[in-house]
Structures are given as structure tokens and as C-alpha cells.
Image: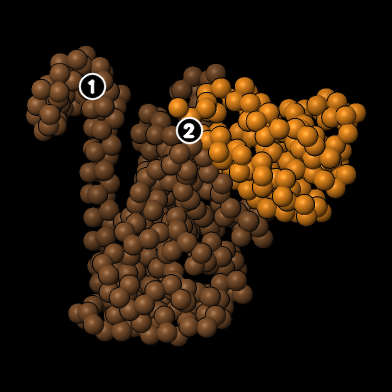
Chain colours: A brown, B orange
Amino acid sequence: MPTADGHLARVLADFRAGKVRGLARAITLVERRDPLTRQLFEALGPPAKSPLVIGLTGSPGTGKSTLGDAIVALSRKAGLSVAVLAVDPNSPFTGGAVFGDRIRMQRHALDPGVYIRSMGARGHLGGLSVASREAVRLLAAYGFDLIILETVGVGQSELEVAGIADTTVVVMAPGLGDGVQMIKAGIMEIADIFVVNKADLPGYERTMQEIRSMQNMGPKLAWKPPIVATVAARGEGVAELKQAVERHQAHLAASGEGKERRRRRLEEEAADLVAEWSRVAARKLVQEDPKLRRRLENEQAPYGVAEAILKEQGARLVPGVSSKEKPK
Amino acid sequence: MPLRIVMAKVGLDGHDRGVKVVARALRDAGFEVIYTGLRQTPEMVVDAAIQEDAQVIGLSLHSGAHMTLIPAVVDELKRKGAEDIMVFGGGIIPEEDIVELKRLGVAEIFPPGSGLQQIVDFLRERFPEEAAAPA
């Protein structure tokens, strides 16, 4: 078994040398929430350029992977390097999973300009996995021009993708719901672009019409999400989608919203990290400290213990900070 | 971190029921299975395993080309410096070929009649940390 530092050094050397294995192993580090993650990012520093991150989300079976495949094909023709991060659910019972996204992307298998990674959501409920955001950051540091982030097949409230992607594409298909579905809160609100895929099936005009009328009911927005009809399996409509993404990018840049989104994203990421670090440390503390456990039992409420942990532990909640170290 | 396994059919062989049954059983054992589909070349399988950072490649062959295709995967792993990725196989493979394939670096071959639990147990034994039975 290699030492942790030795492993990190090898991963970093491979990563910097542009070896796929280095990238793949770095993603595994963030995926298993390895304590080396922080050193990894500190060693890599901020990415030299920021790639475009397109999020693809929508119900199961609407054709997200197939659409992703079509976008990869089009982008490769334009000479862009592309990474696909495809998130799928794990079994809540066994933790196991079968990932099939590569099947739809087989034609890119031997293309060195394309990297595909399947990721288990591992029980996380927002449509992505806990590590998705960090994996996207690694793909950016590796130098990809375009990153496609595909969520699990979502219902109505798995909205995290909008917190990571520059442009969020909500993929729909004909026959999946009526006008009331369209005015519900949630997924319909995070779309920067709507795609009605499988537009060779009957009913697609009606789906487009319903999205349109939902939009007309609401207030006038600075960016009105365009609705693009595609038949992803044949590559139809994908060029129009690409144009819509470019228009959205231009809007983000001109309106300053892009900058605002990046700022919010970092704030959110810092808050999430505080939550994750504290949760991991607090769980351990409660398990190991009989006094805390007794207090929980006496009070039958978590507030006092939670406050005590935050107040007394402070800096010691940060991973890697020894419990003997004095908190500042 | 669950054990990650790339499952593939290499060569011109469309019989994918077996590989799907095994993929399902490995899922139920708590592993993450990346199924790459039919008609893969050895190079495609190895590239997928490297990109996915899988510890294991599982190959299914019913075409009779196992003495060409399975060693080709092992060689390709060596060529890419990824020989730490373990290869196992299954399918209609005669006993004398199994001996030869193991000599060439294949970890195990499961011929017809092997139980799904046998495959799961084999992987758990090889990867005690990643492949522990779910609590």
C-alpha cells in the first residue's frame, strides 16, 4: 500500500502531465471524500481558463445521454475538447449501481479529446453527487473546453445542477405532463434553455406550446429561455441548441449575471463545505463522547448539543486539524 | 467507495444476456458496474476502465475468439501502464484455454454453470476493502 502523500504526488504528476489516469484518480479522490482533496486543489491552484459547463437535466428517458452524445459530436467537429460527467443513482438498498451512459457515447470511445466519467449519486438527493462540483473543477483544471454535466433522471426538485452549470438545459419529451406540471415550482424554473427532445413523436408541438404559455403567464424576464426542438438520436436541432447556448453565454456576459452566478456559486460552495466538514466531525464527536450522548438523551432535542459542538470545537471541525491543536 | 467494474462484450458477439445478468448481480452485491455495451475493441475497454478509474474489467465472450481477445485486453493494459486493473472473464471457454488464459495474467474465468455468488465471492476476496458485503 503506497503512503497517502506518495499517492497524491503520483496523481498530481500524472494529472499535470495530461495523463488520463491522473485525472481519473483525482476524481476518485474527491468521490470518496478523501482528506487529500484539499491538498490536491491547493496544489493545482485556480484553473488557467474556465470552460463552458452545460448542465443537462430532465425526467428519466427524455434522452439526456443521447443529447449529450450529439453535443459532444458537434463540439468535436468544432475542435473543442469535451468531458462528460454522467450521474446515475445508486441502489438505496445495496449501494450498487449499473451505469449505461457510455453505451450512448460509444462512437467517441477512442477519441482522445473526449473524457467520459460515470458517477454514482451515492444517495445524495439533489440530482448530482456530493463530489460533482469538485469533479467539474478537476475537469476544468485538466483543461477541457466544454464540460457536460448530466444529472440523474430527475423529478421536480433536483435543482443542484443550476448551481454548477453555466447554462442549464432542461430536457423534456412529448407526453410527460400537462399545463399544470408546467406551472409547478421547481425544475421548470431553473431552465436557461428548454429542449423538447424526440420531436419526431406526436405531441411535441403541444409540449412546446405548453412551455410557451407557462412563460407568458410569468413576469417578463431579462432572459426568456428559448425552446428548442431536437431529435437527438439523429442529431437534429443540436446546432440550434448550440446557438441558443451561445446566445445565453452572451447574455450572461453582457448583463453581468455570469459574474454574479460565479460569485454566488463560490459562496454556496464554501457554505456546503462548512456543512460537510462539521457534519463529519460532529458525528464522530457524538459517537465518541458519552457526555454529549447523555445530554442528547436528557434533552431529547439536538439544539444544545449542536451549539456546544460548534462553540467548543470551532477550528477543530476542519479535517486535518488535530484535536490537540488549540482553536484560534 | 464501492468497487468499480467495467463490464464489456468484446468482438463480434451479440449475446448480451449473460453479461447483463452478471452486471445486475454485481449491482445487487453493492458494486458500481459500468456497462459499455456490445462490440467493443480491447482498446475501447481499456480506455473506459482507465477513464472510469475501475479496479476490475469483466469480459463476456461467446464467440470462440477468447484466446485472441482476452489476451489482447491484458496486453493493452500493459501497454497503457494499467496492469494493476484486474481482468476476469466468462462465457463458453474450455478448460484447457482457462489454464492458458490464467497463465497470461487473467485473474479468473467463469465457464457456463458458474454461480453468480461465486463471482461475487471471488471479487470480495480479491478486494476485501472496496467490496465488503453491505451491512
Chain letter, disc 2 residue: B
Which quarter shows the N terminus of chain A? top right
Residue at 75% of width from left, 36% of height from top?
B89
Pick the front one: A143 or A199: A199
Asked which secondary structure carries label 1, the reply is helix
Q: Mark 2 points at which residue?
A: B1
Quick check: A26 above or below B118?
below
- Label 2 to label 1: alpha-carbon separation: 23 Å
Pick the front one: A228 or A6: A228
What's the residue type where badge 2 is placed?
Met
Quick check: B49 above or below A323?
below
Residue sticking out furthest to the right? B96
Q: Is residue A34 left or right of residue B117?
A: left
- x then y, percent, for residue B37: 68, 53
Residue A144 visible in this rendered orientation of the protein: no
Asked which secondary structure carries label 2, the reply is loop
Picture disc at residue A285: 1
Residue A221 visible in this rendered orientation of the protein: yes
